[in-house]
Image: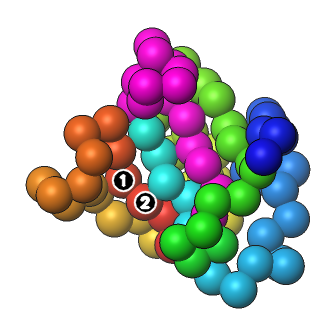
Amino acid sequence: MKEKRVGSIKNVDLSGLRFPVIAVYESPADFKGKCVARVFDMDKPTDTIIVKDTAEEINEDIRRNTHMAYMERDPNDVPSLVGVWM
């Protein structure tokens, strides 16, 4: 799947997703040194990502532009996961 990078979550149409989830990662294997928000439909990844320098930038963008709630990572999650917006 070819990825689609956007600068802000406000540029993403989430209306077609059954249950949108945004997972925020810090320095994942495919983006070392960067933070990435990956948009999922329930547990299935979409092609949409946001790449920023810090998780704080991503979280502030999502907080400002959605009505989603944030959940911190669980100790059993992958180490690069910072948290999830639902």
Which of 44/72 is in front? 44
The residue drawn where x is 72% and y is 58% is: 46
Colouring style = rainbow
- Does residue 37 show up magenta in the picture? yes
| Tag 2 secondary structure | strand
- Residue 56 is left or right of residue 71, and the answer is right
Mark 1 neighbour density, 10 Å: few (under 14) some (14–19) many (20 or more): some
The residue drawn where x is 71% and y is 86% is: 18
Mark seen at residue 84? 2
- Residue 47 is left or right of residue 36, and the answer is right
- Does residue 27 show up magenta in the picture? yes
The residue drawn where x is 24% and y is 39% is: 79
- Residue 67, picture quadrant: bottom right
The residue drawn where x is 36% and y is 53% is: 83
Mark seen at residue 83? 1
Magenta residues span 26-40
The answer to whether one can see residue 68 in this image is no
- Residue 37, picture quadrant: top right
